[in-house]
Image (cartoon, rainbow, N blue to C red):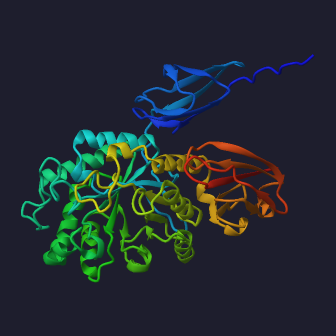
């Protein structure tokens, strides 16, 4: 007599990112199932749900539990996740640096991971309603930083005018005649970012690639350093109320005339020394290499399209303990900027010692400007859910769930790929694209055993990979295609 095995019960995984939000914030719920035919939601959400998917919650003003029940031939299973709403003040700003620490520190004394999106034309190209739409989406996806031009010379429908028709200067190209209407709108955008606990990397006068017509360098030259220093003072007074700004000088150019670059930075410093400053130079450059020990440089940056970005970042990490971020690499949907390519540069940077990185997407960075340099499908609104954006959301969940500031580059951990190990040996991360041999003995300081899991850098889901002694070496085979490429992150966590 044959016996038919009972059908397996449905299995459900449901997560919320972020799991804690400020009042009025949103979270993205993600879920996956197996052995299920149908799912329904209850608690903080309702209705029939797909077997796998994601959904942004409504604005939350109280801690809320979201339950998902799924049924199949093997029965019904329920799982839930709770999003905690923090009703106390939790502003991250202002940020600061401390000697010997390789990361920025927020107002609560916590390490601040720069997890950014490039939005160069945000202030000039979008209406107020569109600004809200963009910021709500990026906040929900875990971005906490935006790279933005304060004044846009080229990439906008009516540059340098904003969407309301306001020009930055009352007299065209005269930095000594700022237009209050324009800068009031800019202030409103920065305030919207502050309301969402987002940092604005603000470029006061984007110089432009090779000092050409994309930016303001030629106009800055005709204005001269004295006017530019006065402009810097104006900005310091006009934006004195905002502590969520880091000033980014330069802009795709390492200028031959340093006096123009220094003038605006020094003008801001004349009025307010509490803000942090950094530099965005020509491609294949680092801020510290060009600026040196200038009194206004607080954060080092790397800007590179090199496939092996890790080496560029590691060189800066080894040269100085100044906080370091990867400020630009190839953008998604430009040239060969696939989702796997852009996340490869993000992981390379963070595992090589950077304490943050900035993602970019075409057309989001210019918001459908008519003179964009690369063709693109759809619109900036459809691009919000690109595979690259999804990958950055997964990256944030991986990093924010552990003490990332303890990581030190250690590629010798793996036979191929990029890796970093926590200074106390408690965990390690390795970004790989094929079968890899891991020197588990390098984790012995963290404990006698190590639990391995594969992290999918596209979906944010984990797959168990076993528990082993922290001795010798072991070969791990990746699970295969991740839905957006062949790359994976091996997560190793030690214990006694």
Question: Which quadrant would the N terminus be assigned to in this image?
Answer: top right
In the figure, is residue 474 to the left or right of 64?
right
Residue positioned most to the front = 1
**Which x, y percent locates residue 284?**
43, 75
In the figure, is residue 420 to the left or right of 130?
right
**Which x, y percent locates residue 193?**
34, 46
**Which x, y percent locates residue 417?**
65, 64
**Which x, y percent locates residue 415?**
72, 67
Asked whether the viewer can see residue 234, the reply is yes
Residue positioned most to the bottom = 256
Vertically, is 142 above or below 488? above
Vertically, is 313 above or below 482? below
Q: Nearer the viewer, residue 193 or 348?
A: 348
In the figure, is residue 327 to the left or right of 184?
right
Vertically, is 47 above or below 109? above
Question: How many numbered marks have been drawn onto this rendered protein structure?
Answer: 0
Q: Residue at x 45, y 30 (%)?
A: 57
Residue positioned most to the right = 1
């Amino acid at each position: 007599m044959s016996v038919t095995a009972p059908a397996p019960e449905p299995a459900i995984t449901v997560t919320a990112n972020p799991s804690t939000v400020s009042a009025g914030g949103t979270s993205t719920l993600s879920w996956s199932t197996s052995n299920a035919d149908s799912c329904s939601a209850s608690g903080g959400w309702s209705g029939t749900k797909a077997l796998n998917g994601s959904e942004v919650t409504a604005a939350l003003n109280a801690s809320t539990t979201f339950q998902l029940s799924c049924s199949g031939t093997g029965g019904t299973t329920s799982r839930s996740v709770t999003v905690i709403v923090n009703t106390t003040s939790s502003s991250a700003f202002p940020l600061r640096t401390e000697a010997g620490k390789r990361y920025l520190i927020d107002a609560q004394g916590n390490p601040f991971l720069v997890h950014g999106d490039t939005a160069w034309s945000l202030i000039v190209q979008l209406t107020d309603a569109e600004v809200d739409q963009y910021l709500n989406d990026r906040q929900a996806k875990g971005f906490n930083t935006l790279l933005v031009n304060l004044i846009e010379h080229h990439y906008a429908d009516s540059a340098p005018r904003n969407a309301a028709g306001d020009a930055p200067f009352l007299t065209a190209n005269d930095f000594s005649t700022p237009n209050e209407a324009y800068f009031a709108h800019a202030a409103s955008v920065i305030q919207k970012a502050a309301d969402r606990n987002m940092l604005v990397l603000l470029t006061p006068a984007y110089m432009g690639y090779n000092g050409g017509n994309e930016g303001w360098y030629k106009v800055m030259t005709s204005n001269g350093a004295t006017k530019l220093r006065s402009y810097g003072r104006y900005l310091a007074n006009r934006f004195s109320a905002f502590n969520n700004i880091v000033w980014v000088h330069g802009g795709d150019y390492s200028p031959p005339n340093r006096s123009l670059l220094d003038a605006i930075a020094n003008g801001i410093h004349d009025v307010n020394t509490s803000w942090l400053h950094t530099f965005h130079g020509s491609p294949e450059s680092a801020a510290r290499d060009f600026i040196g020990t200038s009194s206004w440089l607080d954060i080092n940056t790397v800007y590179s399209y090199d496939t092996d970005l890790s080496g560029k970042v590691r060189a800066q990490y080894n040269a100085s303990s100044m906080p370091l971020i990867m400020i630009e690499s190839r953008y998604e949907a430009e040239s060969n900027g696939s989702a796997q390519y852009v996340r490869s540069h993000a992981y390379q940077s963070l595992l090589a010692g950077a304490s943050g990185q900035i993602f970019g997407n075409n057309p989001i960075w210019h918001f459908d400007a008519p003179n964009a340099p690369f063709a693109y499908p759809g619109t900036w609104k459809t691009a919000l859910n690109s595979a690259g954006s999804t990958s950055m959301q997964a990256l944030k969940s991986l990093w924010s769930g552990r003490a990332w500031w303890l990581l030190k580059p250690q590629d010798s951990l793996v036979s191929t790929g990029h890796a970093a190990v926590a200074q106390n040996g408690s965990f390690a991360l390795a970004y790989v694209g094929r079968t890899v041999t891991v020197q588990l003995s390098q984790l012995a300081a963290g404990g006698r055993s190590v639990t391995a899991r594969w992290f999918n850098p596209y979906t944010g889901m984990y797959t168990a990979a076993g528990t082993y002694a922290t001795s010798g070496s072991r070969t791990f085979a990746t699970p295969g295609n991740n839905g957006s490429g062949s790359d994976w992150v091996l997560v190793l966590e030690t214990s006694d």
